[in-house]
Amino acid sequence: MTQQPIESPLEEIHRTRREISDRFGGDVAAIAEDAARRLAASVRPVWKPRTTNKPSKVIGQQPAH
């Protein structure tokens, strides 16, 4: 019996990314549309942050008058 080489998590991520890209012909918009469709159909909870993650102050800019 021969053992198959163990795939690292990083290698698995890259392989999965290539498979998804190949399935959609590299069309990023189609990949995003499919992901949105699957998310909408999912019954799994999705984490949503309480904030918009926008800075309250931009360093180096003068305040508007």
Image (cartoon, rainbow, N blue to C red):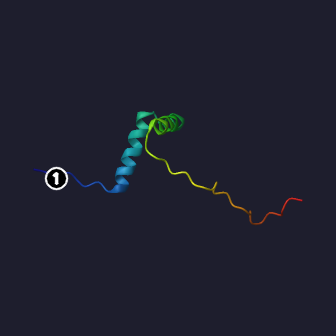
Question: Image check: 13 left or right of 46?
Answer: left
Residue visible at 39% across and 50% down?
A: 13
Q: Residue furthest left?
A: 1
Q: Is residue 44 above or below residue 61?
A: above
- The image quadrant that residue 56 belongs to is bottom right
Residue visible at 41% across and 39% down?
A: 20
Q: Is residue 43 above or below residue 1?
A: above
- The image quadrant that residue 21 belongs to is top left
Q: Quadrant of the C terminus?
A: bottom right
Question: Image check: 19 left or right of 31?
Answer: left
Q: Nearer the viewer, residue 63 or 2?
A: 63
Q: Position of residue 62 (x, y in %)?
A: 83, 64
Residue visible at 16% across and 52% down?
A: 3
- The image quadrant that residue 49 belongs to is bottom right
Q: Position of residue 32 (x, y in %)?
A: 52, 38
Q: Which residue is mark 1?
A: 3
Q: Residue furthest right?
A: 65
Amino acid at pointer 1: Gln
Residue visible at 35% across and 56% down?
A: 9
Q: Position of residue 30 (x, y in %)?
A: 51, 33
- Dot 1: within a 10 Å radius of its alpha carbon, few (fewer than 14), some, or many (20 or more) residues? few
Q: Position of residue 37 (x, y in %)?
A: 49, 34
Q: Residue furthest bottom?
A: 59
Q: How many marks?
A: 1
**Is disc 1 placed on a helix, strand or loop?**
loop
